[in-house]
Image: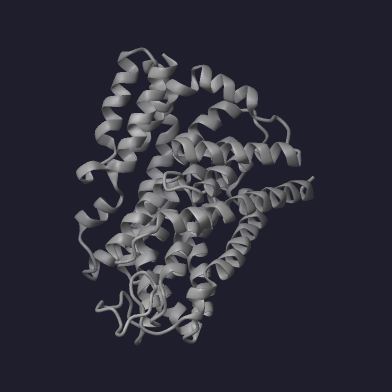
Amino acid sequence: MTVLAASLVGAVLLFAIARPRGLPEIVVAGPAAVAALALGLVTVDAAQAQVLELLPTVIFLAFVLMIAYLADTLGVFSWMAATAIDVSQSSPRRLLAAVFAAASLTTAVLSLDATVVLLTPAVIGAARVLRTPARPYSYATAHLANSASTLLPVSNLTNLLAFAATGLTFAHFAMLMALPWAVAIAIEFVVFRIFFRHDLARQGAVGPDGSPTEAAPDRRPAVSVAGQPAPKLALAVLATTLLGFGAAGFVGIEPFWVAAAGAGVLAAYALRHGYTAPTRVLSAADPMFCGFVLLLGVVVLGVTSGPIGDWLTGVLPTDTSLTGLLVTALIGAAASNIVNNLPATLLLLAALGPSAPPGLVLAMIIGVNLGPNLTYVGSLAIMLWRRVTSNNGEPASLGTFTLLGSITTPLTILGSVAALWLALGAQI
């Protein structure tokens, strides 16, 4: 039965990674969930409880996806790219710093999917405006989509899934993860400056692979730097929504109500002024992917309730010593690269149990969020990033991604866990 349950999870993940003919992940997740129920791997009552537990998180995800789409429609990401160009003063190194800042903030506030899908094309366009190799900036959005996704409960779907298990408020979560977040970003920046030093030293006409060419590539830049006004309403709504997330926990309001309000205000303005259409706003919520998350939770339940879940429960630490935190994070990183970070989070949450110390849950988040920078299959965000870069004429290199990840991943996990241990000690 355990082999069968694991096989169902594997089939769902393989399909989600390959997505043949562009079919949505739910195409296989639905039948797999039905099979798990029919074969007795998961009871109906357990499946219902799992769906109800995940539902608020998935509803929240849908509204955050809408907010990210509407922010893009109202010009937030093109403005960020234009601002990065302006701040860089034509320096590739300064542009890298500006991209790091933009990607870190986008990931923290609008989630990692917004960074890879919406910000990546903008920063590639910014590099082309400066006629400098786009590789450092493109890989920066990929890495920071993971590395900068630990700050807030809203930054990553894994955080949302684990947030309730921490027992923390939104503000307390952010306070404990602020130092680990900053340390991971700082380490990434130092490594990027060294790893891409030759790209950052070159400026002029370049091809898609960063090599010099006789003439600039015949591509229209993805951003315009002339007269790019700040989208004040959109930025104000985003800031207010973020503050609302922090306040919601103190008054017992589910975060998805705050996200719904933010999406509603942006949608009303965008629709009224003709920036988009109702069908596009609804499509941005990606109901197929949201359904996939719910069904994946049911399929994974067949594994967590078996010997694999029991084994993980016995292996995971129970104390928040530096060693305990580091082991938990490393297990999370390994699991994310074996089964993808989303099912890894569900597996590890079940193994940690409802009474796990918040510190261990936060260490697990560090592992499943930073670990995916090691391989292409670690997170769905990296899979999306590969498609986006290819569609924008900057296809990713497996060798570059793997080598860069093998350097940054262990360093960021070690640094972030040490920072978390210090943050936990400071509150005692």
Asked if 144 appears above or below 85 in the picture, the reply is: above
Residue 99 percent location from the top left of the image = 48, 71
Residue 176 percent location from the top left of the image = 67, 50
Residue 374 in view (yes/no) = yes
Residue 36 percent location from the top left of the image = 34, 19
Residue 328 percent location from the top left of the image = 64, 37
Asked if 190 appears above or below 205 in the picture, the reply is: above
The answer to which of 385 and 274 lies nearer the viewer is 385
The quadrant where residue 195 appears: bottom right
The quadrant where residue 396 appears: bottom left
Where is the C terminus found, in terms of image quarters?
Answer: top right
Q: Residue at x 49, y 19 (%)?
A: 305
Q: Residue at x 31, y 74 (%)?
A: 222
- Is residue 285 left or right of 51 when viewed as pictured? left
The quadrant where residue 212 appears: bottom left
Q: Residue at x 58, y 66 (%)?
A: 189
Q: Residue at x 22, y 56 (%)?
A: 280
- Is residue 387 left or right of 57 when viewed as pictured? left
